[in-house]
Image (tube, grey):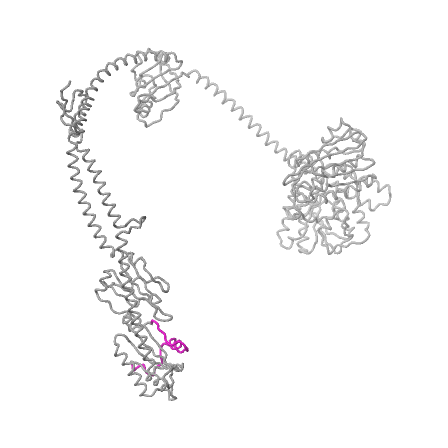
Amino acid sequence: MHGTLSKDPPADAFRGAGIAARVAGIFGALLVLVIGTMLLVWLHGLPLIGLQGASEVHMTKARQALELSADGRVTQIEMALLERRGDIRLLSESLVLAQAVNDGEMPAGRPAESASAAARRQLLSLLTAYPDVYEHLTLVSASNGQVLAANDADLQGLPFADVALLQRLSTPGVVEHIETVVDPMASNGRNLVVARQVLERDHTGLPTGRVLGILVATVSIHSILGEFDRVELRSLGNSGSVSLFDQQRRILAAFRLVPLADAREVARPPAGEGIEGSFIEAGADGKALLAVYRFVRIGAMEGWSLVVRRERDEALSELSQRAWQLLWFGLLFSLACLLLVTLAARHLTRPIRSLAKVAQRLADGDLGARVFPHPIAGGDEVSALAATFNAMAVRIEAWHTTLAREVEMRTRELQDEKRIAQRYLDVAGVMLLVLDHSGRIALINRKGCEVLGWPESQLLGVDWFGRFLPPPLQEQRRALFNRLLTGDAVLPARDETTIINARGEERLIDWRNILLHADDGYIQGVLSSGEDITERKQIERQLHAQQSQLEVLVARRTADLTAALAAAKVADRAKDVFLANVSHELRTPLNAVIGLSELARRLGTDPRQRDYLDKIANAGKTLCNLINDLLDLSKIAAGRLNFASETFSLRDLVRRCHSVMAYKATQKGLELCERVANEVPDVLVGDPLRVEQILLNLLSNAIKFTAAGRVAIGIGVCQRQAQRVCLEIIVEDTGIGIGEKDLGLLFEPFSQADATMSRRFGGSGLGLAICRRLVTLMDGEISVSSHLGAGSTFRATLWLQLGNSGDLTASTTPSDDEPLPSTYHDARVLVVEDQPINREIAEALLTEVGITPSVADNGRAALDLLYAGGGQAFDLVLMDIQMPVMDGLTATRELRTHGEFRDLPIIAMTAHTMEHEKEVSRLAGMNDHIGKPFETRAFYQLLARWLPAAKQQFVATLTPAASAATRHFPDDETTTSPDRKS
């Protein structure tokens, strides 16, 4: 194959000028970059090393030129102003003007004609000498303000118009005044006024200090500023301007080589006095201006601002033109160099292009292609490269022959390996399937052949989608397969598909799939392993059907339970209504029993009869206590007992309990002791009534079962935290004690130690049960230790929040040992009660303290009485709740809608004593609550709390009524929770 030549490749297969073009492009880019960098450095300099650019140098020169022009014009203004001031000073010292002023002050009131004419000639001589400088010259009398002499004869004898100027110069010490004034006759609308005092002089010619008159000169501002020739203006450029402004930033004069169409377009200087320096500012058209400011002081209170401006772009225009010239020169130079480099590169790369053509033939399969048919003469790098290329071509030809033999050998080895791999695939217990890029079977194992029912030879190369899938799925699956191969879809890692085997049966296969990729990332096909799950799915469907049946049964049972729960709630509400009704119906006759027995006892004198009445009253109170305990126990069991959160004093609460139980202890001859440890905080937050209920129950229980000795209560701290404290309450007695076998039943409802005790001491056995449940609800515990005949010790722990003494509120309820009023003077009370017996009891109790009440048997009748009497007719209303015609709640609500009855105390006097019933009465507008049956002292305490203090009368000795009111009736069972105030 040596010496043979293959066909040359197409002309566009290799671009011979590629290297030359790249070399030329790189060289041209570098050259343009260098030229551009040098131009930028020339324009802007290098600030980091302090090298200034041409633009900065040019701007500095332009700024210096403007400053030089501004300084020269300022000097001219100052010199011209100095000359005018000198002229006016010499003229004011003239004896002729002084004589004219003196003659003007003669009694005749007019100056002599000769003095006035002489003064006018003096003024005209100065005006003639400087015709372009002075506009007006006026001599004014300081005494009367009249014009004594003027260049305009028509003004002579008239009052001077500028009175403010006369007042300033009439002040001693103000010799001269200069200001800019508005003059409509001037070309620019303004002139400069230079005024000076004319002073009286003595015979030696020295001023005496007396002001005789004022010399006022109106000077043209243009004469002060001077004229600009075109040469001077041309030095500032077409955009250059010189502007003069007064202190109010009003333009006095302006000069431009190219005049503006509107003088209002001249930019005003910024606000401020005495601004000087060079600035860059924005013009009216938004262009940047280079401006130089100079301040010219023309008087003590007057100054002008001279502004010389030039557009910055115009100042830099010459520099920009030079920069563009340099840029074009650099570009032309770059193009010339680029052309030379391209020609040189093409000449140098000609042998390389020839070498590239032979390399392309070798790549196309012409292994005999060589660079030159004969050895290359010369020793340069290209010749060495050609020789090396020929040697490489010879070696490639040899390698090709060797590689062909190795490929043939490797092919046989791969076929052997394929047969071994097929054996491994056949061992697998799942179906293995490979589909090529056309969707045909490329590989399948023995399990797959068994599932499909065909031998391997008849399956390889078969279209999988058209042969083994149901017709409805064929096109859908084939489209998905094609999208997988193009990357437009994601292959599901797991898939369930129905196939059709050789027997026509549908089998459900659970597939696990992966894509097969070539080394270059090209997707060659899909490898899937499948498991026949037809029988398993049938079992799952059966299980699902059974599960659905179970769910139906569960839903049905849930509905039954929901209905039962709703029925239980209805029954619970019915129980609450029943308890409330039973409580009301029991308390109403009990109120009659207890109240009438109290009244009858006071009237009777027979000791035996009084004893019977006491027993009737005690039996009624015992029954009332039992009702209260049952209600409390019912609320605790139902979880509806709510605890208040009030700030209270623990030591006051203990003293109150001691006061209540002292009477019982004294009756039995017992010593009642109390002890509160010093570390126990006094101010706590919790439900004081429930704490008091626990203490009273424990003390009452101890006193009841103690015949002799003592009963002691002690309170200490069991545990303390940051915001709360755990109290330990210990009640000890020297009573009969409790047997160990009976301790377990002690805190159960309706249980006592034994039946004998129950018969001996009585009681229902609810007190300690209520104590235990109250203590548990307050996160505490209760226990007892006792031995028969050795007394008992009850221990209870309660958790309460720590309080602040500032939150304690004074109690409005008199304590049991506080005296109550013996009688009331002119107190008016309305009793609203439908039960005649209850009305009779209330009337009797009120009569005993000097009150004759008014009565009504229903709410409507009460409203009629109140409306008829007005807001001041009654001091207090005792209102029953459950009444015919109109109940007490409705009557109270209607009454509170009238402003005159909003402050009238209305007390609920009812047998409805449950907490939610008290809340309903409070929301209806009632102020307080007393439950039936009530004790006499509690009734009188209520009167003392709500009747006006001015109508209460006290005596040193208790009346029979008061003595009866303070009498204690021993309870048969534990003390229950007192009624909570609204």
Give coordinates of residue 929: x percent, y percent: 69, 45
> Along the horizontal axis of the image, is 338 left or right of 78?
left
Q: Measured along the vertical axis of the image, is residue 778 above or below residue 212?
A: above
Give coordinates of residue 703: x percent, y percent: 79, 37
Q: Residue furthest front?
A: 379
Nearer to me, 52 or 677: 52
Give coordinates of residue 366: x percent, y percent: 17, 21
The answer to whether residue 503 shows anywhere in this view is no
Nearer to me, 297 or 643: 297
> Along the horizontal axis of the image, is 391 left or right of 145?
left
The answer to whether residue 633 shows anywhere in this view is yes
Give coordinates of residue 507: x percent, y percent: 39, 16
> Along the horizontal axis of the image, is 141 left or right of 787?
left
Q: Which residues are magenta?
A: 152-180
Q: Measured along the vertical axis of the image, is residue 198 above or below residue 330?
A: below
Q: Quadrant of the N terminus?
A: top left
Q: Would you identify the image quadrant in which residue 739 lies? A: top right
Q: Would you identify the image quadrant in which residue 316 lies? A: bottom left
Nearer to me, 648 or 77: 77
Q: Would you identify the image quadrant in which residue 750 lies? A: top right
Residue 165 on the magenta span: yes
Residue 220 on the magenta span: no
Q: Measured along the vertical axis of the image, is residue 18 above or below residue 815?
A: above
